[in-house]
């Protein structure tokens, strides 16, 4: 069956291996490899511009300048803060978006200086997603160096809000407002290595707050305690049994509350992340979570005979839609064909990325790694090994060319 689908795909799209023989494409790939030192220097320079959650403006301005310097048309910033620029083809369609995200997980004040030891770069965000941003620029430059004229149009986007509580706000805005109904295919470049993400893991995120009157730990003893209620809720969540297939997860990521060791708290809170690649499974977990939280408040109140009752609020702070691009779809088969043409081992994955949004809308979408070897993502010790990283650049260039046909 897979061979049949692959055969049907080849009837409707050009094999990337045959595209490689075109002089302009060959010149673009040669340029991508030759210019890799410049791509790496840009990666470092971009990474040393801080872009903490909800504060991507400074890095965005630099990308906007570089988009303009490289000759993109209609370079602008949309209402969400996405930086957008277009390289027009012979026609408007197919209209491809190639994106990478501006933001990092690191808070304001984090030291973003990048150090270099041989082929190893170290710095917060150096792979995720400074590598992706540098590849957007490399693709543009390689296409121009090779004088590649694509049949379709390619729009490059440096988007906001991919990490943490950013809640994919940049990509959501792209598809609901700034480029609504214009995008035929979507590729996100996120992180390192050679993976191809075809399954978008959905998530719901909550901030749960238990509240009560509070009081002195001795004088008011016997009163319901928001922190104790929080503990009851965490215990219930920790005992959840979830399926391995589809992979489904839960996590209490942050907790807080209280004023003193000798005071019954008036407030306690936690932030919770629920995930699954299957929307119905995620919804079932969500219902179970909300039931556990409310039961925890009720149990705490019963324990103390409703004296100083605890109440609970459940606030949704993030919702990433689940989605999937079938393996037999033309965009995935094109990506696999590009990897094979360049001698790259295939590696299909599931993850939560900007591609979740178009996948959920049934728009052909994948996320690819930017090549090289990364380690320590989302940590202060994040690193990127540049050995043979040019191959990731070449893959991104060839994929953009192949999809714009």
Image: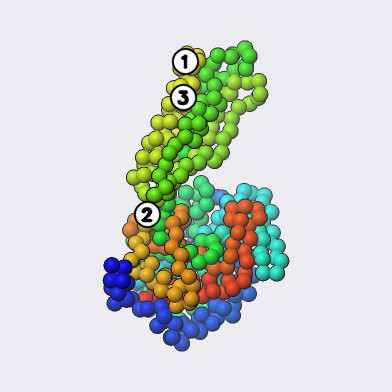
| Pointer 2 residue | 323
User: How far apart, in angstroms, are the residues tagged by discs 2 and 1?
Assistant: 44 Å
Q: Is residue 52 visible?
A: no
Dot 1: few (<14), some (14–19), or many (≥20) neighbours within 10 Å?
some
Dot 2: few (<14), some (14–19), or many (≥20) neighbours within 10 Å?
many
User: How far apart, in angstroms, are the residues tagged by discs 2 and 3?
Assistant: 34 Å
First along the sequence among labels 2 and 3: 3
| Pointer 1 residue | 306
| Residue 277 in picture, x, y percent from top left | 40, 51
Tag 1 secondary structure: loop
Q: In this orientation, which residue lies closer to the viewer: 348 or 197? A: 348
Dot 3: few (<14), some (14–19), or many (≥20) neighbours within 10 Å?
many
Image point (31%, 68%), residue name: 2
| Residue 200 in picture, x, y percent from top left | 41, 55
| Residue 351 in picture, x, y percent from top left | 46, 55
Q: Quadrant of the C terminus?
A: bottom left
Residue 316 vertical placement versus 328 (above, below): above
Q: Are marks 3 and 1 in contact (CB under 8 Å)?
A: no
Q: Disc number at residue 297?
A: 3
Residue 33 vertical placement versus 45 (above, below): below
């Amino acid at each position: 069956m897979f061979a049949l689908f692959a055969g049907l795909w080849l009837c409707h799209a050009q094999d990337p291996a045959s595209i490689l023989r075109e002089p302009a494409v060959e010149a673009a790939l040669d340029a991508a490899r030759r210019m890799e030192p410049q791509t790496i220097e840009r990666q470092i320079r971009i990474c040393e511009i801080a872009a903490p959650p909800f504060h991507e403006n400074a890095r965005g301005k630099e990308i906007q300048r570089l988009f303009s310097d490289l000759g993109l048309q209609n370079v602008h910033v949309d209402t969400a803060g996405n930086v957008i620029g277009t390289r027009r083809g012979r026609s408007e369609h197919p209209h491809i978006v190639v994106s990478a995200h501006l933001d990092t997980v690191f808070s304001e004040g984090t030291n973003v200086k990048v150090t270099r030891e041989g082929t190893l770069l170290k710095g917060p965000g150096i792979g995720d997603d400074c590598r992706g941003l540098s590849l957007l620029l490399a693709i543009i430059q390689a296409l121009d160096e090779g004088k590649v004229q694509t049949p379709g149009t390619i729009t490059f986007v440096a988007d906001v809000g991919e990490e943490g509580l950013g809640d994919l706000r940049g990509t959501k805005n792209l598809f609901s407002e700034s480029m609504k109904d214009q995008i035929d295919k979507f590729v996100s470049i996120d992180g390192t290595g050679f993976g191809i993400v075809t399954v978008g893991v959905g998530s719901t995120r909550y901030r749960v707050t238990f509240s009560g009157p509070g009081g002195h730990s001795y004088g008011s003893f016997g009163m319901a305690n928001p922190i104790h209620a929080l503990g009851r809720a965490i215990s219930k969540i920790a005992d959840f049994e979830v399926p391995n297939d589809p992979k489904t997860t839960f996590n209490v990521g942050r907790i807080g509350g209280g004023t003193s060791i000798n005071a019954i708290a008036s407030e306690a809170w936690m932030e919770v992340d629920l995930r699954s690649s299957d929307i119905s499974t995620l919804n079932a977990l969500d219902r179970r979570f909300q039931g556990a939280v409310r039961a925890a408040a009720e149990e705490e109140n019963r324990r103390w005979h409703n004296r100083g009752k605890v109440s609970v609020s459940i606030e949704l702070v993030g919702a990433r839609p689940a989605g999937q691009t079938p393996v037999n779809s033309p965009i995935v088969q094109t990506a696999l064909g590009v990897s094979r043409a360049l001698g790259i081992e295939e590696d299909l994955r599931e993850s939560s990325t900007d591609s979740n949004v178009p996948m959920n809308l049934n728009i052909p979408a994948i996320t690819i790694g930017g090549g090289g070897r990364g380690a320590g993502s989302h940590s202060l010790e994040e690193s990127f090994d540049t050995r043979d990283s040019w191959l990731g650049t070449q893959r991104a260039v060839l994929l953009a060319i192949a999809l714009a046909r």
